[in-house]
């Protein structure tokens, strides 16, 4: 039987992983500059963590979660997003007790959603995200947005568009909720079943519907910004002022609605405007989630964060011709001409590697010409030739592949010589 990779997933082969490693290194370095530290949470969590925090009317909970029952009868779910697990870890491990607040964290790892596969979207995908928990300052909102923009710009991306909105506090959202119900209710029968179910439970989700996004009522729906109370308006103005101070350009879009129920106040998305990127332009999204800690049993701890898909990050780099890779450098390749030489080559190979020299040798018992071709194909800096004469003399022929020059070096001095040439 021929096995294939599961639908909605893909293998990352060595030809691709160099680009992934370069992006991951850039992300980690940017987080270091902003003083965000890495957190790693389990790949699966209690199902209720996501139904309570993400929202039972969202597409993620209703249609996309990979949920299973373990042998103890507990309902578990492969994590579809990273914020809820991070906040759960923040609460469970009492990070709110740290004297350094807010607690600034980042994560990077696989997420799982059962959705239709399309360009840059898979059922298993890798997500990078940050969470700043413990502060309700508008300045930290701007910092989180700045970090996301900085990651993309440090990678060389230029075709970017930052869109922001305010979802307001609970009072503002309740006023907007009533306005949405009045707006959609007379014609709700024209909408999909999901929208009809959401009308009373969470009408804000209607604005995020992909099926009915072209319905005329979508364009005339009440804007949340028209229902912001004074406190929410003042908060949003401070966020914009901080972004202006950082020199970050943005567009205010009153229709921007994030797809998870825990968001309030600041919401934002970063989009690619590159011609070759594709129809789905969103690269990154996030926002503030005051109240999430309390929702899952913790103390009051306001937070803000974002998540970005690494797959879509790489797509944007490709669209702008900015693809980058970590160099897989091979310092030396050992060419052994007979069985006894191969035994010595194994010994020398171990010594070179212990000295921090990237080295390899032939394991296919090929002729010298084929071994030299392999060294050239792998772009070896030096080729070390060992044969009968070299074994007698205790010295190998060392060829500089770039310059074509060759010298004889004692076995015991090979590592020292190669290190001096690098």
Image: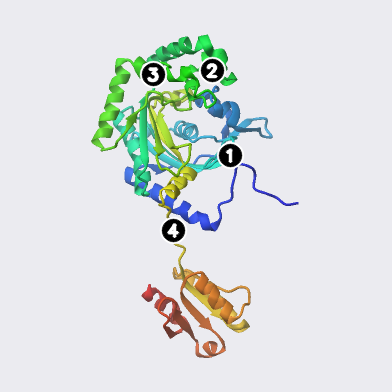
Tag 1, which secondary structure?
Answer: loop
**Quarter in which the C terminus is drawn:** bottom left
Q: Disc 1 vs disc 2: Cβ atoms closer than 8 Å?
A: no
Q: Position of residue 78 (x, y in %)?
A: 58, 36
Front of the two marks 4 and 3:
3
Residue under label 3: 224
Residue ID at (50%, 90%): 393
Between the C-alphas of marks 1 and 4, the distance is: 28 Å
Within 10 Å of disc 1 (Cα), the crowding (few <14, some 14-19, many 20+) is few
**Residue 122 horizontal side relative to residue 248, left or right:** right
Name the spot of residue 296 as percent of width and height, x first: 49, 25
Q: Which residue: 48% across, 12% down?
A: 181
- Inter-mark Cα distance, 2 to 3: 17 Å
Separation of disc 1 and disc 3 at Cα?
32 Å
Disc with the residue nearer the chain's start (2 vs 3): 2
Q: Earlier in the sequence, mark 4 or mark 3?
A: 3
């Amino acid at each position: 039987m021929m096995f294939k990779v599961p639908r909605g997933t893909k293998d990352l082969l060595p030809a691709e992983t160099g680009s992934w490693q370069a992006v991951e290194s850039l992300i980690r370095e940017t987080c270091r500059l902003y003083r965000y530290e890495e957190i790693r949470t389990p790949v699966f969590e209690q199902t209720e963590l996501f139904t309570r925090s993400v929202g039972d009317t969202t597409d993620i909970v209703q249609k996309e979660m990979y949920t299973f029952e373990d042998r103890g009868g507990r309902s578990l779910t492969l994590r579809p997003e990273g914020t809820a697990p991070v906040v759960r870890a923040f609460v469970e491990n009492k990070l709110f007790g740290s004297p350094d607040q807010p607690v600034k964290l980042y994560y990077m790892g696989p997420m799982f959603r059962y959705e239709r596969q399309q360009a840059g979207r898979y059922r298993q995908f890798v997500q990078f995200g940050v969470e700043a928990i413990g502060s309700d300052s508008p300045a930290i909102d701007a910092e989180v947005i700045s970090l996301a923009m900085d990651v993309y710009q440090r990678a060389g991306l230029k075709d970017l568009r930052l869109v922001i909105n305010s979802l307001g506090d609970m009072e503002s959202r309740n006023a907007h909720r009533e306005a949405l119900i009045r707006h959609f209710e007379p014609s709700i029968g024209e909408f999909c079943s999901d929208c009809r179910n959401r009308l009373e439970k969470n009408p804000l989700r209607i604005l995020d519907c992909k099926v009915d996004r072209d319905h005329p009522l979508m364009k005339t729906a009440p804007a949340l910004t028209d229902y912001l109370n004074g406190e929410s308006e003042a908060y949003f103005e401070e966020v914009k002022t901080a972004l202006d101070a950082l020199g970050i350009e943005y567009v205010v879009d009153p229709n921007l609605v994030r797809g998870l129920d825990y968001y309030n106040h600041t919401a934002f998305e970063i989009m690619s405007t590159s011609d070759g990127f594709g129809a789905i332009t969103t690269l990154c999204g996030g926002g503030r989630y005051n109240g999430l800690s309390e929702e899952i049993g913790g103390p009051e701890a306001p937070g803000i964060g974002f998540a970005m898909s690494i797959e879509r990050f790489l797509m944007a780099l490709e669209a702008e011709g900015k693809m980058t890779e970590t160099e897989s450098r091979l310092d030396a390749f050992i060419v052994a001409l007979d069985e006894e030489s191969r035994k010595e080559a194994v010994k020398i190979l171990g010594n070179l590697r212990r000295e921090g020299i990237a080295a390899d040798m032939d394991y296919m018992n090929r002729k010298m010409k084929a071994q030299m071709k392999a060294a050239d194909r792998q772009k070896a800096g030096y080729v070390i030739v060992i044969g009968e004469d070299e074994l007698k003399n205790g010295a190998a022929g060392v060829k500089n592949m770039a310059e074509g020059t060759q010298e004889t070096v004692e076995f015991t001095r090979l590592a020292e010589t190669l290190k001096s040439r690098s």
